[in-house]
Image (tube, coloured by chain):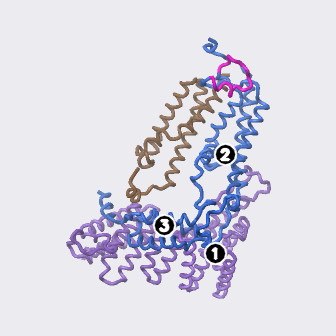
C-alpha cells in the first residue's frame, strides 16, 4: 500500500523528502552491514529503515531525481537480492520511470511477462504490469489482467480498489460499486472506502436518468453517514454528506415523511429518507465542515480544506439568492 | 520449638557476587541466545503455487463475507452468497479437483506436514535443552549449601526441593539453596525478557506452555491433514445460515441521535 | 459482551486492544520490580511484603485509571473492571518476588 499512501501526500512533502535523500544515505551508509557480526555492537537494523528507503525511492522518482532513486534502489538490491519480489517490482518501476519512449516501455512490459511466465505468483510484478498497461492506455487489457489477478487472490483490496478506479474512468458504475463492496467485505471499518463508495454513487446518480436519481442519492447519503459515524472528523465524509443532502433537498418534494413514502431504495430494503431528516443532515454537515475548517489541524490536506470552503461559500450564495 | 527462634546464619557477602549474580546473568544471556537461535533456525515460509493460494484465499473470501456481511446490501450479499455457495459445492476452487472424496493425506507421509512438525519440535528443543543444561550446571557447581533466606515462609513439603543439598531437619524452609534461586529467576525474568527483546520473544516460557495446551488455537488455515473440500462444504453451510443485517439501515437516525 | 449488531456499528479494533494490554503489562512488571526492591530494602517479611505489593499495585492502578484512562475505562478496555485493576498481577508478582528476595538478602546480610 505504500505507493498509494505516498500518492496521497502532497507534492511538497515528496520534494522535501527527496531532498533529504542524500543526507540520509550518508548517515546510514553502514547500516546492517558491519564486518564483525556482533549484533550488540553494530547499528541495529530494523524494518523501518528499509521502509524508509522504499519511500525515499518513490518520492525521488516523483520529483524527478533519478540518480538518488537509483542509489536507494541499489541499497535495496544489495540487502535483499535482485530476485526478491518486492525489489523486482521497484526495479521495474524505476525502469518505467526513466524510459524515454514507448518502445522501451514495451520492452519493460515484455520483461514483466517473462518473469510472470516463470513464476505466476509474483504479485508485485503482476501489479506493475497492470500499471504499465494503464500508462500505455491499454485499459481493456489492464482490466482483463486485474480480473485474472483477482481470480486467484480475491482478498487483495489494493487490486479491487484499482479495478474500481478503472471502471469509474470508463463510467461503468455498477461494476465500480461491486468492486468497492468487495473491499468493504474485507475491511468493513474503512471509512474512506465508505466515503469513496458514496462518491461513486453520487457521480452515477448525476450521470444517470432522473427517475432513479433520488434513490441512488439516498443510498449515497447513507454511505456518507456511515463514514462519519466511524470517523468523527472526516472532512471528505462531511463534504460528501453536504453535497448529497443538498442535492436531495433540491429534488425531493417538501413534505415527504418516510413511513408514507412508497418509493424505496436498494430494491425495497430501506425506506426513502424523509425531508426533515435530510435537512437536518445537511445542516449538521455544514456545521461540522465549518468547524473543521476553523480548527484546521494538520490532518487535513490543504486542497481538501480549500474545496470545503468553496462548497460552503457556494451554498451560502445559493441560499442568499 | 526450634521453629520459633529466629534462625540467622552469617554469610559472607562475597557469596552474592559469586553466586546470585552469575546465575542471573547466565540465565538472562541464555534467554537472549535462545531467542536469537530460534529466530535464525526458523525456515522461511515455503512459497505456494497459484492453485494453492487461490484455494486458501477463496476460503478467506467466504469467511469475510460471513463476518462482514453487514457492510453491503441484502441484494449484493445474496448474489455473492449464491455464487460462493455453488462454487464451494462444486469445488471450483480446489487445487486438486481429482482428489475429492479421498481421505486426507497421512501426516507422516505428507512432506509439507513433516516440515511443520519439525519446526515445532525444534522450538521445543530450543526451550528444553538450555533449561536442563543450566540445572545440571547449578547442581554440579552450586550444590550443598544454602545461599539465602526467602522473605516469606513456605510449607515443609518444599524443603526437599529447595534445600536439595543440605540434609538437615531443623533448618527453616526459608533458607534455600541456589536451585531455588534458579527457579525464582526462571519465572521472574520473563518480564525482563519482554523489555529487552520485545513482545514475541522465544524465551517466553508462559507463551510456550499455553501454546502447548491449546494446539488448535493460532494454527494456520490449512493445516496438513485437513481436507480442503470438507472445509469448503462447512463454510458453504455456514454461509447459508447467515442472517443479513444491513448496517446502513437507520444510520442517519443513529448519526443524528449521536449529535444530540 | 455487546450484541453482534452493536459490534458491527461500533467495531472493536484488535490492535488497540493489544496495545492497551501491553501498556498495562509493561507498567505492572516495571512497578512490581521496583516494589520488590523497596520491600527488600525495608526488610519486610512474608505477609507484610505481599500486603505491600498489593497496596502498591492498587495505587498504581489508581494512577493508571486517573491519568492514562482519564477516568473512563470503558473507552479503553472491554470488561473494564477486571483488566485495568487486576490484569497481570500474577506476572508482576513473580518479578516482585524475585527482586524482593534479591534485595532482602543483599541488605539484610
Mark number, residue A125: 1
Using a 10 Å C-alpha cutoff, classify the residue at mark 2 as few (fewer than 14 neighbours), some (14 to 19) or many (20 or more): many
Distance between the Cα atoms at labels 1 and 2? 38 Å
Residue A63 percent location from the top left of the image: 60, 74
Q: Is residue A215 magenta?
A: no
Disc 1 and disc 3 in contact, CB within 8 angstroms: no
Element class at badge 1: helix
Residue A259 percent location from the top left of the image: 23, 68
Which segment is the magenta one? B156-172
The subunit carrying tag 1 is A
> Is A314 situated left or right of A296 in this image?
left
- Where the N terminus of chain B falls, by quadrant? top right
**Residue B149 in which image quadrant:** top right
Mark before the other along the chain sequence, 2 or 3: 2
Question: In this orientation, does residue A306 appear?
Answer: no
Is A166 above or below relative to B89? below
Q: Which chain is blue?
A: B
- B79 or A37: nearer the viewer: B79
Amino acid at each position: 500500500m505504500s505507493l498509494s499512501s505516498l500518492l496521497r501526500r502532497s507534492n511538497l512533502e515528496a520534494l522535501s523528502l527527496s531532498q533529504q535523500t542524500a543526507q540520509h544515505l550518508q548517515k546510514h551508509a553502514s547500516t546492517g552491514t558491519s564486518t564483525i557480526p556482533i549484533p550488540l555492537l553494530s547499528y541495529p537494523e530494523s524494518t523501518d529503515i528499509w521502509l524508509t528507503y522504499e519511500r525515499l525511492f518513490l518520492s525521488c522518482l516523483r520529483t524527478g531525481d533519478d540518480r538518488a532513486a537509483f542509489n536507494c534502489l541499489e541499497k535495496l538490491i544489495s540487502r535483499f537480492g535482485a530476485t526478491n519480489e518486492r525489489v523486482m517490482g521497484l526495479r521495474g518501476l524505476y525502469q518505467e520511470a526513466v524510459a524515454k519512449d514507448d518502445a522501451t516501455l514495451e520492452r519493460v512490459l515484455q520483461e514483466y511477462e517473462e518473469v510472470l511466465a516463470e513464476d505466476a505468483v509474483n504479485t508485485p510484478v503482476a501489479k506493475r504490469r497492470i500499471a504499465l498497461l494503464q500508462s500505455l492506455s491499454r485499459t481493456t487489457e489492464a482490466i482483463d489482467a486485474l480480473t485474472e489477478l483477482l481470480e486467484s487472490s480475491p482478498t487483495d483490496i489494493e487490486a479491487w480498489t484499482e479495478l474500481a478506479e478503472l471502471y469509474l474512468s470508463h463510467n461503468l458504475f455498477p461494476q465500480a460499486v461491486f468492486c468497492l463492496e468487495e473491499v468493504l467485505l474485507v475491511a468493513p471499518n474503512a471509512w474512506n472506502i465508505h466515503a469513496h463508495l458514496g462518491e461513486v454513487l453520487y457521480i452515477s446518480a448525476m450521470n444517470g436518468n432522473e427517475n432513479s436519481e433520488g434513490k441512488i442519492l439516498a443510498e449515497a447519503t447513507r454511505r456518507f453517514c456511515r463514514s462519519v459515524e466511524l470517523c468523527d472528523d472526516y472532512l471528505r465524509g462531511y463534504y460528501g454528506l453536504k453535497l448529497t443532502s443538498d442535492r436531495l433537498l433540491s429534488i425531493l418534494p417538501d413534505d415527504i415523511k418516510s413511513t408514507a413514502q412508497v418509493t424505496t431504495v436498494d430494491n425495497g430494503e430501506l425506506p426513502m429518507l424523509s425531508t426533515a431528516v435530510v435537512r437536518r443532515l445537511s445542516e449538521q454537515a455544514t456545521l461540522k465542515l465549518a468547524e473543521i475548517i476553523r480548527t484546521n489541524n494538520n490532518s487535513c490536506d490543504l486542497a481538501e480544506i480549500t474545496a470545503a470552503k468553496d462548497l460552503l461559500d457556494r451554498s451560502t450564495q445559493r441560499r442568499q439568492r | 520449638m526450634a521453629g520459633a527462634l529466629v534462625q540467622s546464619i552469617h554469610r559472607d557477602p562475597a557469596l552474592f557476587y559469586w553466586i546470585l549474580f552469575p546465575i542471573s546473568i547466565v540465565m538472562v544471556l541464555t534467554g537472549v541466545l535462545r531467542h536469537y537461535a530460534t529466530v535464525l533456525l526458523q525456515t522461511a515460509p515455503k512459497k505456494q503455487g497459484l492453485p494453492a493460494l487461490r484455494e486458501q484465499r477463496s476460503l478467506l473470501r467466504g469467511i469475510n463475507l460471513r463476518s462482514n456481511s453487514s457492510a453491503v446490501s441484502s441484494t449484493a450479499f445474496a448474489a455473492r452468497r449464491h455464487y460462493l455457495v455453488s462454487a464451494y459445492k462444486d469445488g471450483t476452487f480446489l487445487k486438486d479437483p481429482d482428489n475429492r472424496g479421498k481421505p486426507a493425506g497421512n501426516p507422516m507421509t505428507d512432506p509439507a506436514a513433516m516440515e511443520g512438525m519439525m519446526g515445532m519440535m525444534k522450538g521445543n528443543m530450543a526451550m528444553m535443552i538450555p533449561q536442563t543444561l543450566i540445572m545440571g550446571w547449578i547442581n554440579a557447581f552450586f550444590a550443598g549449601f544454602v545461599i539465602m533466606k526467602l522473605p516469606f515462609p513456605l510449607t515443609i513439603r518444599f524443603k526437599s526441593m529447595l534445600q536439595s543439598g543440605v540434609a538437615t531437619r531443623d533448618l527453616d524452609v526459608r533458607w534455600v539453596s541456589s536451585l531455588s534461586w534458579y527457579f525464582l529467576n526462571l519465572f521472574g525474568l520473563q518480564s525482563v525478557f519482554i523489555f529487552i527483546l520485545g513482545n514475541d520473544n522465544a524465551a517466553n516460557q508462559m507463551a510456550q506452555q499455553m501454546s502447548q495446551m491449546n494446539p488448535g488455537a493460532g494454527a494456520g488455515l490449512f493445516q496438513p491433514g485437513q481436507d480442503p473440500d470438507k472445509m469448503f462444504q462447512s463454510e458453504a453451510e455456514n454461509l447459508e445460515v447467515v442472517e443479513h443485517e444491513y448496517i446502513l439501515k437507520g444510520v442517519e437516525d443513529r448519526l443524528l441521535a449521536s449529535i444530540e | 459482551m455487546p450484541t453482534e449488531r452493536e459490534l458491527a456499528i461500533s467495531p472493536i479494533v484488535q490492535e488497540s486492544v493489544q496495545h492497551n494490554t501491553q501498556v498495562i503489562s509493561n507498567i505492572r512488571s516495571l512497578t512490581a520490580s521496583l516494589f520488590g526492591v523497596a520491600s527488600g530494602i525495608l526488610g519486610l517479611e512474608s505477609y507484610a511484603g505481599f500486603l505491600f505489593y498489593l497496596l502498591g499495585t492498587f495505587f498504581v492502578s489508581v494512577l493508571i485509571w486517573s491519568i492514562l484512562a482519564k477516568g473512563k475505562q470503558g473507552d479503553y478496555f472491554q470488561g473494564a473492571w477486571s483488566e485495568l485493576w487486576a490484569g497481570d498481577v500474577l506476572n508482576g508478582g513473580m518479578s516482585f518476588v524475585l527482586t524482593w528476595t534479591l534485595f532482602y538478602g543483599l541488605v539484610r546480610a
